[in-house]
Image (tube, helix red, strand yellow):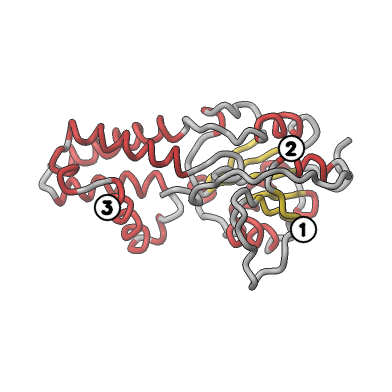
Amino acid sequence: MPHPRFRLITFDLDDTVWPCEPVIRAAEEAVLDWLGARAPRLTDRHDRLSLREHRGRLMAERPELAHDLGLIRRLSIATLLTELDYPAELADRLAAEALAVFMAQRNRIAPFADAEPVLRRLAADYLLVSITNGNADPELTPLSGVFHHHVTAARAGAAKPDPTVFSLALALAGCAPDECLHLGDEPYLDVEGARRLGIEAIWVNRSGRSWPTDLEPPTLTITDLHQLADWLDGRPPAATPAEPSGDPDGV
C-alpha cells in the first residue's frame, strides 16, 4: 500500500542506485585508448588522472559551465589538443567523438542488487524521478522504463545542492515539496539540498560512512533500497550488510 504522504520519490543515481567509480574508470580508459589511436601527442602527455585534474581546473576557471560534465569533458579535450598544435577544427571534432565514446561506456552500469527489483516495484505506486549531477541516462541502462522523468544538472542548468534541480523534478511530476521524498548518498548534495526546499530526505549509506556533525540527522539512514520499501510500508527496515561504494558523481 503506498505511503499516504508521498506521491513522488526522487533518487540520486551514482553510488545510490549503482556504483559510480568503476564505470567512470572504464569509460575514461576507453577514451584514452580511442585517443591514443587518433591523437597520440595527447596520450603521450596525459593519463586518466591528469586529464581528470585538467577538467577540475577548467571547472574552477569556468564555474558557469561546471554543472555540465559532458561539456566540460569535451572542452577539456579540445583545449588540450589545441595546446598541442592540433588544428582547432580537428580538435573540436575529436573532442566531440571522444565524448561519444565516453558516454557509450558511461551507460554500461551494473545496478546494486537491490536497486532494480525495488525500483520497479515502487514505480507501480509512486512517481519516480532520477536526479543526478552526472550524465548517465537510465533509459540506456538495465533500469530503462523505471523512472518517469530524468533530471540532470546539465538539463536543469545547475547542480545539486542547488534547489533548481529539485524544483525541476517537482515541476515535471506536478508535486509539492511535502509530497516528495528524496534519496541520495551525499549528505550535503542530496539530503541537505533536498531539505532546503522542504523535501524529506533519506540517506543511502552503502559504505558505512559517518554522518557529518554539522548537519541535522536525516529522516532515515539505509544501506539498501529494500529498507526503503520496508519503511514506506510501515515496517522497521531490516538490517542488511553494506555494499562497497565508489566516489560521488564522476567528472
Hey, what amino acid is under mark 2? Leu
Q: Which label number is shown at residue 127? A: 2
Residue ID at (56%, 39%): 18
Q: Secondary structure at mark 2?
A: strand
The quarter holding residue 127 reads top right
The quarter holding residue 88 reads top left
- Horizontally, residue 35 falls left or right of residue 194, namely left
Image x and y of residue 246, in percent = 50, 47
Mark 3 = which residue?
50
Hey, what amino acid is under mark 1? Thr
Q: Which label number is shown at residue 219? A: 1
Q: Which label number is shown at residue 61? A: none
Q: Nearer the viewer, mark 1 or mark 2?
A: 1
- Horizontally, residue 38 falls left or right of residue 197, namely left
Image x and y of residue 173, in percent = 71, 41
Q: Secondary structure at mark 3?
A: helix
Q: CA distance from mark 1 to mark 2?
A: 20 Å
Q: Nearer the viewer, residue 246 or 126?
A: 246
Residue ID at (42%, 56%): 66
Residue ID at (68%, 49%): 183
Tell me which label, 3 or 2, sits earlier in the chain. Answer: 3
